[in-house]
Amino acid sequence: MFTVKNESMLQQETPCLIVGLYDRPLKFAGELATLDELFNGELTELVKEGDLSAKSKKVAIVPTLGKMPAKRLLFVGLGKEKQADFHEMKEAIGGAFIKSKHLGLTSVAVALDSFVCEEISAEDAAQAFSEAFGLATYEFKGYKQASNEPEKKVEQLTVLTKAESEAVQAALQVGYVLSQGTNSARTLVNTPGNMLTASDLAAYAEQLAVKYGFEVEILEKADMEKLGMGAFLAVNQGSTEPPKMITLKYQPKEEWTDVLGLVGKGITFDTGGYSLKPKDGIVGMKTDMGGAAAVLGAMEIIGELKPNQNIVAVIPSTDNMVSGHAFKPDDVITSMSGKTIEVLNTDAEGRLVLADAMTYAKHHGANYLIDVATLTGGVIVALGTDKTGAITNNEELFEEVLEASFEAGEFIWRLPLTEKDKKRIRNSSIADLNNSPGRDGHAIMGGGFIGEFAEGTPWVHLDIAGTADTNKGGALGPAGATGAMVRTLALLAMRRNEE
Ligand code: BES
Ligand code: ZN
Ligand code: ZN
């Protein structure tokens, strides 16, 4: 898919040559100057007239009319060189791929060195390029009857650079792997609840395990009953679909110590149960396994890039349904940890399945816990749909997660969890905890509840209710599932490898 060549862009035969344009202020230097000469200074004229702009994320097509082997130039605006930013560059490149797709191109070349500046090395540019390529060209096929138009997408990428080709090739691979793990999560989240049950999710995890040599364990209902997973089982009570507790283990180290636990909410559809969601709020609840998808997407990347970090991934999966068997408000249930829970709201089910998953991850030796969940509508009210809400009991671990999120280009914002908040979670006349202390601050209540099951273990909670999907497509992906937190989790594992 990627071919790296130490050749000049002026010689490359291609239907489309992608060229980065910095505002330096804009002048054509180096190979770009030769290019401008080839066009008798017409490119400079295009800039003057505003047809060609180095403004960040602007794209413009210039046909070469036989002046060079490339058929057309696709200029990508990169903004001021001094302010060059890796994530902004990915968006700019994403825009170029969307343009290429609209043009029906199947093969493009890129003048990689035109993307390089003081802040961005050739390797950075290569990673930005392949990551943006993978993310921007993602499509969820859906279930419409096949149209007879043949599908065209960019499949062949030629990367022209003076930089060392092996390093560039390696960076291209990393970016591509990051995009593919994200896209796998997107596909899982986009798949409707009738086509992705807990059993389907378990089968998917088993396939990943086979591909990457992970250890896999799927707990069945009877196993969970033996282990006393009363919180998880309560949520499954109303369902005709069997619950699955999915565990994947990746052990690159000799000893099973220093284990990072990734716990993902895997509710394949959330009706709310007897605390039924309103008819508008229920649509879209196929995305309630976004946490599970983020963990599985990250595991795919981990399987490819093989960081030296022990990891256990735990995914409690079921749907949350209504029936004569379903659990009800007022029920008191007993979690695997022994803590009892008064159910005040059956729609606050994520924290219940995660409670047992957290305990189970610790049971499997997790020394650090990250939970990822489409947990609360409250986080959307608090932070909007472009920021993942975080809660922690450990500054150091949170700092690591935050650093990984910077590297991934994913926005995380921390919410407080005070002793007063914990009191509200522990306020029940009949049990140790209650699962819904009220609407005020409820993103904090949801996260804080899960924290009760971390006990002393360093823990970070990531609420992706707002970020797991989007109703607006962008340069790095269409509307629908986003694959939020896949890259943050994977890069967290990669960073711990470097320690
Ligand atoms: N799955 C929902 C949260 C959600 C809301 C995800 C919107 C994506 C978009 C969760 O299980 C839920 O229903 N939470 C309740 C909690 C409340 C009952 C305390 C909520 O947010 O209203
Ligand atoms: Zn719910
Ligand atoms: Zn839910």
Image: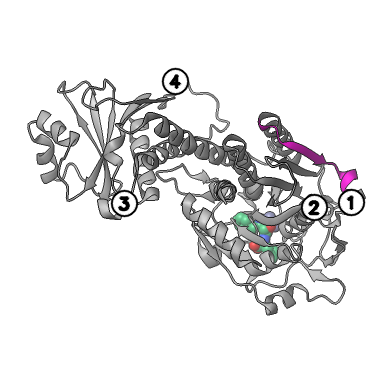
Q: Is mark 2 on a helix, strand or loop?
A: helix
Where is mark 4, residue-wise?
150
Residue 303, image quadrant: top right
Q: What is the magenta range?
A: 212-224
**Image side of residue 79 versus residue 179, left or right:** left
Q: Residue at position x 7%, y 31% from top?
A: 40
* Residue 227 circle label: 1
**Badge 3 density bin: few <14, some 14–19, many ≥20, Cα 10 Å:** many
Lower sequence index among marks 1 and 2: 1
Lower sequence index among marks 4 and 1: 4
Q: In the image shown, does 452 or 400 lie closer to the viewer?
A: 400
Give amino acid for label 3.
Answer: Ala
Considering the image in quadrants, where does the N terminus appear? top left
CB atoms at circles 1 and 2 under 8 Å apart?
yes
Is 165 included in the stretch rendered in magenta?
no
**Badge 4 density bin: few <14, some 14–19, many ≥20, Cα 10 Å:** few
**Can residue 39 be seen?**
no
Q: How many labels does the image show?
A: 4
